Amino acid sequence: AQSVTQLDSQVPVFEEAPVELRCNYSSSVSVYLFWYVQYPNQGLQLLLKYLSGSTLVKGINGFEAEFNKSQTSFHLRKPSVHISDTAEYFCATGNEKLTFGTGTRLTIIP
Amino acid sequence: GAGVSQTPSNKVTEKGKYVELRCDPISGHTALYWYRQSLGQGPEFLIYFQGTGAADDSGLPNDRFFAVRPEGSVSTLKIQRTERGDSAVYLCASSLTLGAPLVGELFFGEGSRLTVL
């Protein structure tokens, strides 16, 4: 079965500093990978996804992620965070049926 | 409406009672999904529909849980004989269709928070 692991439950970052949120996947077959964001009091929203092709994927709000097959990782990055990036971030894998990680709460420190 | 709408937003019930949670997907979206999110966890798949039929209900935890989508639009998640362990946020999502290149592009509602006392 496909699964993802998010080792960091909380990540505090100073405003305008870079951030990396880690995600590792486990799958023996071709893998689709996703990052979703949940802002306070809002529904989950797709940030970006990897299906195939270029391993560097760019998403909304300045986020990007890199698919690394040798390390089975799909880490999310942003070069400079803003207060508005405060949210919970979920890595996910799957096809029609997504399996989500436990989430990483990103807190931006002014 | 513009997004996925879920009602009620909050539901408090007593152990053993019957509960219905409603989801109104984005107009034109053929696929509809139900997930459950417990405190401190990521969303957990329950069931998804393509049109009126349940394409995959493998995530429903037991036979107390049932979902319908009779006309291919609105869906209702039904929970019989509720238990305290059913307390969670129930999320509904819809997508335009299934399969690449739109795979995984789900639009989520804000969820229905169920508390079983």
Image (cartoon, coloured by chain):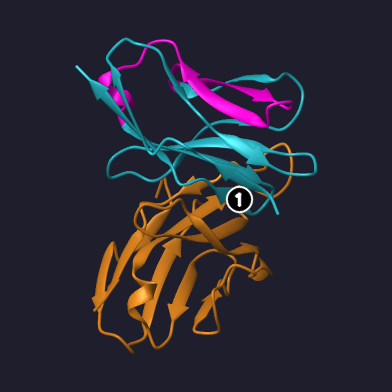
Chain colours: A cyan, B orange
Q: Nearer the viewer, residue A107 or B105?
A: A107
Q: Residue at x 34, y 57 (%)?
A: B39
Q: Nearer the viewer, residue A80 or B26?
A: A80
- Does A71 sit left or right of B22 as displayed? right
Q: Residue at x 43, y 43 (%)?
A: A44
Specify the quadrant of the image occupied by residue A19: top left
Judging from the image, mark 1 belongs to the subunit labelled A
Q: Residue at x 28, y 40 (%)?
A: A40
Give the extent of the magenta segment: A61-86
For the C terminus of chain B, the quadrant is: bottom left
* Percent position of residue B103, x then y: 67, 43
Q: Is residue A76 magenta?
A: yes
Q: Is residue B8 magenta?
A: no
Specify the quadrant of the image occupied by residue A17: top left
Q: Amino acid at mark 1?
A: Leu
Residue that label 1 marks: A98
- Regarding residue B6, the answer to whether it shows in the image is yes
- Does A2 sit left or right of B112 as displayed? right
* Percent position of residue A90, x then y: 47, 40
* Percent position of residue A83, x then y: 26, 21
Q: Compared to A75, does A101 lie above or below? A: below
